[in-house]
Image (spheres, rainbow, N blue to C red):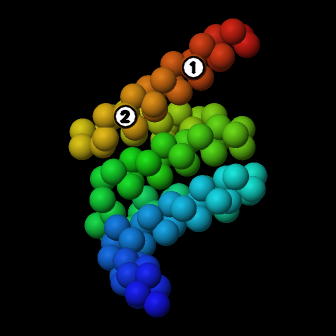
């Protein structure tokens, strides 16, 4: 019972709401429901007062889903935003840069 209370209470914080949306996006991405994942990540990103670490992770994951859906331009935009975020966790920024390099390499090889 106490765990349910803590879970409900966590949903009342901006971080809790953002993480809930982020996790829904992850579930939708695993199920290959690209549009639902994009919508859920977008909702997490646009939430007022979303913590920068959650925003960076949601933006990174949305970029990956955009890429999987064939929306390469939008994917690059999201990954570039993550890489440019000053306060984002360094590991998330590094992963975004790596994906951008990999995408550029693939693009050059396919031309």
Q: Quadrant of residue 102?
A: top right
Rendered location of residue 88, percent (x, y): 30, 43
Rendered location of residue 109, percent (x, y): 69, 9
- The crowd level at tag 2 (other Cα within 10 Å; few <14, some 14-19, many 20+) is few
Closest to the camera, between mark 1 and mark 2, is 2
Would residue 60 be found to the left or right of residue 64 on screen? left
Residue at the disc numbered 2: 91
Check the image and name the residue furthest to the front. 1
Mark toward the start of the polypeptide (1 vs 2): 2
Would residue 11 be found to the left or right of residue 22 on screen? left
The residue at the point 44 percent across, 48 percent down is 57
Q: CA distance from mark 1 to mark 2?
A: 16 Å
Check contact, mark 1 vs mark 2: CB within 8 A. no
Rendered location of residue 21, percent (x, y): 51, 67
Q: Quadrant of residue 91?
A: top left
The residue at the point 55 percent across, 48 percent down is 62
The residue at the point 59 percent across, 40 percent down is 64
Q: Is residue 7 above or below residue 90?
A: below
Check the image and name the residue furthest to the bottom. 1
Residue 82's label in the rendered image is none
Q: Is residue 4 above or below residue 105?
A: below
Q: Nearer the viewer, residue 94 or 4?
A: 4
Tag 1 secondary structure: helix
Q: Nearer the viewer, residue 67 or 74?
A: 67
Rendered location of residue 59, percent (x, y): 46, 48
Tag 2 secondary structure: helix
Q: Is residue 36 above or below residue 70?
A: below
Q: Is residue 18 above or below residue 83?
A: below
Residue at the disc numbered 1: 102
The residue at the point 42 percent across, 66 percent down is 18
Q: Nearer the viewer, residue 6 or 73?
A: 6
Is residue 43 visible to us here?
Answer: no
């Amino acid at each position: 019972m106490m765990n349910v209370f803590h879970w409900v209470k966590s949903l009342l914080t901006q971080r809790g709401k953002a993480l809930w949306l982020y996790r829904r996006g992850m579930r939708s991405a695993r199920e290959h429901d690209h549009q639902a994942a994009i919508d859920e990540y977008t909702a997490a990103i646009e939430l007022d007062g979303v913590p920068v670490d959650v925003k960076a992770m949601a933006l990174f994951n949305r970029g990956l889903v955009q890429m999987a859906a064939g929306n390469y331009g939008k994917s690059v935009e999201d990954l570039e935003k993550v890489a440019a975020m000053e306060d984002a966790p360094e590991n998330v920024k590094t992963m975004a840069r790596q994906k951008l390099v990999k995408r550029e390499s693939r693009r050059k090889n396919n031309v």
